[in-house]
Image (spheres, rainbow, N blue to C red):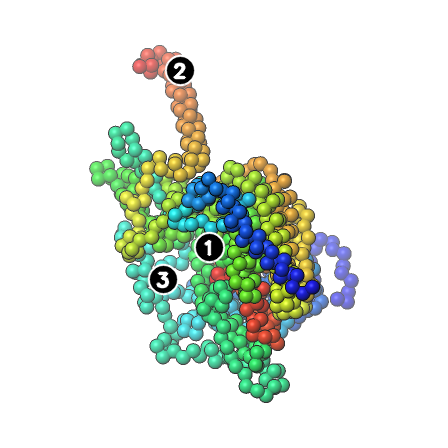
Amino acid sequence: MSEQTPVKEAPANPPTELEKRFPGAVKRDERPGFEGHIVEVAKLHEVAAAIRDEMGYDFLSSVTAVDYYSEAPEGENFIEVVYHLYKSTGGGALVYRVQVPRDNAVVPSLVDLYPGADFQEREAWDLYGVKFEGHPDLRRILLWEGFAGHPMRKDWKEPYFEEDVKPFKNRWPEGQVYRIEDRNPVGKNVSYPQGFDPDGFQETDDPRMYESLERSSQDFIEQIDTEQVVVNLGPQHPSTHGVFRMAVRMHGETIVGLKPVMGYLHRNHEQIGERNTWTMNMPFTDRLDYLSSMSNNFGYALAVEKLIGEKAAPPERAEYIRVIMAELTRISNHLWAIGFLLNDLGAFFTPALYAIEERELILDIFEATAGSRMMCNYFRFGGVARDLPEGILPKIKDLVTDRLPRKVEELDLYLSANELVRSRGEGVGVITPEDAIAFSAAGPVLRASGVPYDVRRADPYSIYDRFKFDVTVRQHGDVYDRYMIRIDEIYQSLSILRQALKDIPEGEIMNGKNPYQVRVPAGESYGRVEGPKGELGFYIVSTGKANPHRYHVRAPSFINLTILEKMCVGQKIADVVVNLGSIDIVLGEVDR
Amino acid sequence: MYGIGILKGLWVTLVHFVETFTEDFRWIGRKRYYSEEGVAARRSKDAKGIFTVQYPEEKLPVPEEFRFIPFLVYEVDEEGNKHDRCTSCGICAKVCPPQCIWIVRTEDPVTKRPVPEPVDFFIDVDICMNCGYCAEYCPFDAIKMDHDYELASYDRHAEHIYNKEKLSKPVEYYASIRPANYTREEAVKAAEEAKKAEAAAAKAAAAAATAQASGGEQAAS
Ligand code: SF4
Ligand code: SF4
């Protein structure tokens, strides 16, 4: 920018910094309720590079597509790809988007700028059919080869189609009761792409995957002229993390390439979410990362409340309850993660069960407040579903001030200094801070690499600005640090809990009534929380109707997997499972 | 010295191991297993030693808010007739996320007016996701979440669509599993009734006053 920024005399529409920098290529998004800029498709790469390098937006949080479709010929008909970026030093979002025609959805890939866009672009291709030009490995990621079409498109219908939106009218017509299964029998509920023969199916996707595996391990192949083997780990529960598969290419015992394969549990959560009403989505968010449903509720509630505005601002007591629940969730999740990381290290189940004992006591609290141990469904827009039951606060206090600190210390004594844990963890699966940011890693994985980024501090939501706590950070970025950082975080959560328990006021727990239908004004919003596994974001678009137009989940487990190959290459095969364990994934969230 | 960390860790497991027995000794004379007291102690913040609850011989007590499958509440009047609280308004069916509620409404054969109580009421419990929304949003406190979680059956095709008969439970049952909720709701209802009665009384008084003013004596009778 050569000229001085003129003193603003409050002109009607001063051009924004981006508009000045790229005249003609960037224009502001003028739709009511929308923010950010619309970028010309041809200029996307250039603009994105400038935004990263000149403006410092180095963390690509979310990439997703939205389908604007109408049957009327003059209606809007395009696919939009939305990018949410943040600075790794903190602050608010920068949003930009490109719009492309539905029948020719081609967008330049940003993988070379942000490697973290890799899986997210593949997902947009899979679900929306957006072609990302220049993507090194544009294959389906959640669905399989024999899947017909791109299911998130608004004109896509499943073979057994009921209705576009709930509540359905036709589920049991004429008062006749049917089991859905009998009306939609297995075998009749699928359709295949044209010319696809499921019986003669050869796994064509796999050779393509092995090719890409070969490509990514090219350097090694040239250096060493020996035969390499491909080993498939999974898909049958590699060490209890869920149905997940890793195709590993090895030279001797050294890994030269690794491709995660997922989608075995794909339920098209987002499609279900767009048929649901706003309220109905809440219990479905429980089923994402089913180990921390309270956090999922939190993120979704925040996103919708942001769109509704003041009318849905939760009262004080509800905010405190939310924070208490979210932090308890973090503790229980980290206990689980530590326990199962030790399983992956070969310490079979003793540490895991010691950790799960404490988690059980936390789940008892969830059960008493929310009604269910895991599927909590506790948050509502503008508050929480019900007040804390009689006598639960002293119970939480006992746990937080007495039992948990004692037990976490014990766990620390039990494991942290253990020479085997150290030698299996130190220097294994190292991620540099630069890589962690570039690959959009989030949560403990990012912080263990020396990047002090925590959404609770970087972009505070709810009432987190009131509490004193440290953003934990460790410097080595290896498995051991990713283990230690979870212990550190438990201590910080305990400290937040103690403060919250001291200050929690009496009063209302809902802003106004809790209606069964909420009115959400047209617009978009991106709500994100620091979930136990990392940044959990919900991108929603409303058209003012009873159902969301777009409902997208930025799942930390899914995106953290992008860096798995980078972590593993050059290491021994025995470390793969440990590396995976140290990311702490839950397949409910990866596959959605 | 190499190995210190491992020894410390082993010490922790040893403590856990020993505690299992010392706890049993401390409970001599009292029932540590198969008793409510014992289960409660094993779920408290001071729990040591064996943590496991031996299901199904032992069961964890469920908290009041615990939810599983919904049930319909009915009341019995003095003559012994059952009355559903449900008015077949359909809100629960609308709000149910997986859409597993079906209500059969009816009309009076003579007057052709809709009858509030449903003829039948179905919930497909294979689809129900136990979210509790139906109970939360029912304006008549007619559908509530049950505590019973042992629902295994031999034939899911035949038995997993619950009808009204299977879903209905008396209001006393509801009061017994959710006493705090029940008391709260009854208090709200009583307050509303009182308000209504008051309003009615005020209205009657006003009517009587006008009647008196016009000289009529019938109002009193
Ligand atoms: S159970 Fe409640 S919400 Fe459902 S139809 Fe009956 S009265 Fe309406
Ligand atoms: S608990 Fe939820 S899923 Fe089950 S019937 Fe009620 S509203 Fe439907």
Q: Residues within 10 Å of mark 1 (few under 14, many from 20)?
A: many
Q: Residue furthest left?
A: B110
What is the chain identity of the residue bearing mark 2? B
Quadrant assignment for the C terminus of chain B: top left
Circles 2 and 3, Cβ within 8 Å, touching? The answer is: no
Residue A514 in the image: above or below residue A125: above
Residue at screen point 55% across, 81% down: A214
The residue under label 1 is A284
Residue A79 percent across, percent down from the top left: 51, 66
> Image quadrant of residue A89?
bottom right
Lower position in the chain sequence, tag 1 or tag 3: 3
The residue under label 3 is A161
What is the chain identity of the residue bearing mark 1? A
Q: Is residue A289 visible?
A: yes
Residue B181 in the image: above or below residue A158: above
Q: Nearer the viewer, mark 2 or mark 3?
A: 3
> Image quadrant of residue A393?
top right
Q: What is the distance, in whole Å, between disc 2 and disc 3 at their CAs?
A: 65 Å
Residue A358 percent across, percent down from the top left: 54, 51
Residue A392 percent across, percent down from the top left: 53, 40
Quadrant assignment for the N terminus of chain B: bottom right
Q: Secondary structure at mark 3?
A: loop
The residue under label 2 is B209
Residue A472 percent across, percent down from the top left: 67, 56
Q: Residues within 10 Å of mark 3 (few under 14, many from 20)?
A: few
Q: Secondary structure at mark 1?
A: helix
Circles 1 and 3, Cβ within 8 Å, touching? The answer is: no
